[in-house]
Amino acid sequence: MAKKRKKTRKELLKEPDEFLTISAKLIGLAREYQTQLTWALGVILVLAVVFSGFRLYLIRSEGNASALLDSSVDKYRQAKSSADPQAAFQQVSADFESLLNKYGSRQSAKLGRLIYANICYDAGKYKQAIGLYRAALGDFQDWPMISGQIIASLGYACEQLQDTAGAVSYFEKLSVAPEAHMQDEALYHLGRLYEQQGQSEKSKQMFAKILAEYPDFIYIDLVKERMSG
C-alpha cells in the first residue's frame, strides 16, 4: 500500500484556511440578508423596550394599588372608631370600589376585595358581601386556610339572608374539604341548620361526628347539650 504523501508547507499555504472560509461565508450571508437582519434586530429591541416598559408599569401599578389599599384600610379603621359599621362602610365604599375598578388584577386589589367583603358583611350588606366573597374564592384558591374562611363567610352571609339551603351548601363543602382546620366548625353549623330544616337525624349525625372526632372543639359543651336534649 502506497504511503500517503505529506503536503509541503508551500502547498498548505496555497489551500484556503477553513476558519477564513467560514467567516467569509458568514459575512457574505449577512450582506445578502442585511435588511432582514436589521429588521429582526429592530424587532428584538422593540420587544425588549416594550417588555421593560410593561414590567415597569406592573411595578408602578402594584405600588399604586398597595398605597390605595393602605389608605382605604386606615380610613376605615378611623371611621369605625367613631361610627357604626354602616356609617364606616359609607365613608370607604368609594375608595374600595376605585381600587377594584382600577387595579382589579393586582395582588393588593385581591386582598382589598376580601377586606371589602368583610366590611360589607359587618355593615349588613350581605348580598354585596356574597358577590365579593365569591370573586375572592378565585383569588385565593391556592390558599386553603383563606379559602376555607371565605367559604364559611359565604355560609354566614347566606344564613343572614335567610337562605338556609345556600348556607347548608357552603358548610357541606367546607365539611369535606381536604384541609381539616375548619371541618369541626362546618359540622356544628350543619347540625344547627339541619335541625332548622327539620332533618333531626342528619343534625344528630353532625353533632355525633364532632363528639367522636373533635373532642376539643370550642363549642363542645353546646354540642353535648344538643345531643342530650
Image: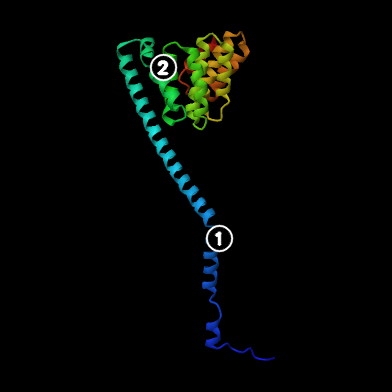
Residue 163 image position (x, y, % from top left): 56, 10
**Label 2: which secondary element:** helix
Identify which residue, 133 or 174, lies in the foreground. Answer: 133
The answer to whether residue 193 is seen in the rendering is yes
Number of labels in the image equals: 2
**Label 1: which secondary element:** helix
The residue shown at (30%, 17%) is 78
Mark 1 surroundings: few (<14), some (14-19) or many (≥20) residues within 10 A: few
The residue shown at (62%, 11%) is 199
Residue that lies at the very extreme toward the right in this rendered image: 1
Mark 2 surroundings: few (<14), some (14-19) or many (≥20) residues within 10 A: many
Q: Mark 1 points at which residue?
A: 32
Q: Which mark is residue 119?
A: 2
- Quarter of the picture holding the N terminus: bottom right
Residue 140 image position (x, y, % from top left): 49, 29
Residue 132 image position (x, y, % from top left): 49, 20
Identify which residue, 188 or 141, lies in the foreground. Answer: 141
